[in-house]
């Protein structure tokens, strides 16, 4: 593998792409640590240290590499773009115009990308406004009494904050597209990967400072989890497809054999994002509708005790069931067996032993249902592993377990995809690749 890396860096155009990608990542991390105007960085750090990970925004803070709870220029991270992309993808099933654009190829995909950008800006405005409102009301950092925005009575200061955070999201979106166009790998995914990786050293040091034995157990667990995730992420069911010979003019076409790959984890990390977002909505509603001086009612007490506390068995069970549900839901709307069967029939393809048309679609539904079950259970188990660790160790106050759940799923998936892209470019130049 080291020889392959040397080969990649020795190739001028590939070296230029790798260095360009690293430069964009450095710019992204600088923006993630730069405080937004009007924010007291000293007070923000003091409140963040008191919080110790007990926050409903753990998922957004994960994707932003800790920038959210620093109220930095890139505080919102890439989360508005992810949400917008998911919404547009779901709307392609509901809105015929979007479905038509999806089928138009590159031109239609360009239109959908433009709609995603517009929706990202709208969501960034909403999320930055809500974030600033929570910070002004003192509800972003729990019971911290420090003024994170000293001049919070100035409307101008608050407007500048919202505009800055929205512009930060736009810059992140632009940086991600630059990496995709001129660098290596998928830009948005690499920025998420960078944000997650940036938090691992500090969180690992916190565990090491508390207990060396716990740190050793975490490292062993991390290696086992990563190996398991790599194994499952590459697992797929290959359905053989045979194409019949066809005479077009004076030439014979077809007669080839291939396969239709169905991944065990067909939905990726999207169900985990859905479930996490849905879980923190009740606490967000409580914070926005209930003032800090108001006595907590039964609903807010239940939310804080069972839904927000990640080591609670109610939280763990709800999280797991939501992930299983959203896995089936997302696979159901993104993979259409009827369309695949029609495409195969159109080009003369068929599954050996299965008649073309409806029987093929029913067979694909059957196979997809069989592999979606272990895929959903796998996603749920990996996602709740950090919560189980917190409950078993009794460390419910420190919820920064860095080597499990969403973090591992994203990092392994992005890492494998990036390595494969570098591998393909090396193979085009007849170099020895990574995956021998």
Image (spheres, helix red, strand yellow):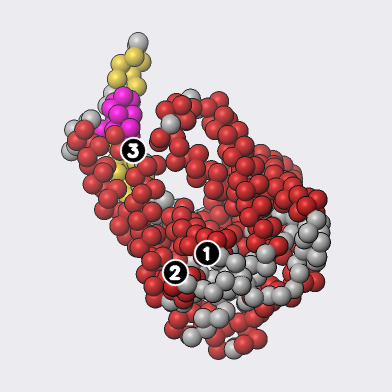
Residue at the (29%, 48%) spot, across then down: 368
Q: Which residue is mark 1?
A: 286
Residue 318, percent across and down?
A: 38, 66
Q: Residue at x 58, y 30 (%)?
A: 110
Residue 345 counted in the magenta span: yes
Pick whichever of labels 2 and 3 is earlier in the sequence.
Answer: 2
Q: Earlier in the sequence, mark 1 or mark 3?
A: 1
Instruction: Name the residue that disc number 3 marks.
Output: 336
Q: Position of residue 102 (x, y in %)?
A: 47, 30
Determine if the magenta segment contains residue 394. Answer: no
Residue lying farthest to the front in this orientation: 294
302 left or right, relative to 21: left
Residue in the image at 57% along x and 29% along y: 111
Residue at image mark 2: 299
Give the crowd class for mark 1: few <14, some 14-19, many >=20 residues within 10 Å. some
Judged from the image, the secondary structure of the residue bearing numbered disc 2 is helix
> For this view, does 79 lie left or right of residue 39?
left
């Amino acid at each position: 593998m080291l020889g392959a890396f040397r080969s990649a860096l020795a190739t001028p155009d590939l070296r230029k792409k790798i260095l360009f990608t690293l430069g964009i990542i450095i710019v992204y991390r600088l923006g993630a640590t730069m405080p937004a105007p009007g924010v007291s960085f000293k007070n923000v750090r003091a409140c963040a240290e008191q919080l110790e990970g007990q926050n409903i925004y753990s998922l957004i803070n994960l994707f932003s590499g800790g920038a959210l709870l620093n109220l930095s220029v890139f505080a919102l991270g890439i989360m508005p773009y992810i949400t917008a992309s998911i919404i547009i993808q779901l709307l392609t099933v509901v809105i015929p115009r979007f479905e038509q654009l999806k089928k138009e190829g590159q031109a239609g995909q360009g239109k959908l990308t433009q709609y995603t950008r517009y929706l990202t800006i709208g969501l960034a405005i909403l999320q930055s406004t809500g974030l600033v409102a929570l910070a002004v009301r003192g509800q972003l950092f729990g019971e911290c009494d420090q003024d994170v925005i000293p001049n919070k009575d100035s409307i101008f200061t608050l407007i500048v904050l919202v505009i800055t955070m929205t512009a930060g999201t736009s810059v992140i979106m632009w940086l991600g597209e630059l990496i995709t166009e001129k660098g290596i790998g998928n830009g948005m995914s690499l920025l998420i990967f960078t944000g997650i990786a940036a938090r691992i050293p500090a969180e690992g040091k916190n565990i090491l400072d508390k207990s060396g034995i716990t740190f050793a157990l975490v490292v062993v667990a991390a290696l086992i989890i990563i190996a398991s995730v790599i194994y499952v992420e590459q697992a797929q069911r290959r359905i053989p497809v045979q194409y019949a010979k066809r005479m077009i003019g004076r030439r014979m076409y077809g007669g080839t054999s291939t396969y239709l790959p169905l991944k065990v984890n067909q939905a990726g990390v999207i169900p985990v994002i859905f479930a996490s977002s849905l879980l923190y909505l009740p606490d967000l509603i409580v914070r926005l509708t209930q003032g800090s001086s108001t006595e907590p009612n039964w609903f807010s007490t239940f939310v804080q005790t069972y839904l927000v506390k990640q080591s609670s068995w109610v939280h763990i069970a709800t999280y797991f069931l939501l992930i299983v549900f959203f896995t089936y839901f997302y696979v159901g709307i993104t993979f259409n067996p009827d369309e695949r069967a029609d495409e195969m029939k159109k080009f003369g393809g068929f599954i050996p032993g299965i008649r073309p048309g409806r029987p093929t679609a029913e067979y694909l539904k059957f196979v997809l249902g069989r592999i979606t079950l272990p895929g959903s259970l796998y996603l749920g188990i990996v996602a709740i592993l950090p919560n189980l660790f917190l409950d078993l160790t009794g460390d419910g106050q420190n919820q920064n377990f860095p080597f499990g759940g969403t973090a591992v799923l994203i990092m392994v998936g992005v890492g494998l995809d990036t390595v494969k892209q570098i591998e393909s470019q090396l193979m085009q130049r007849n170099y020895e690749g990574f995956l021998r």
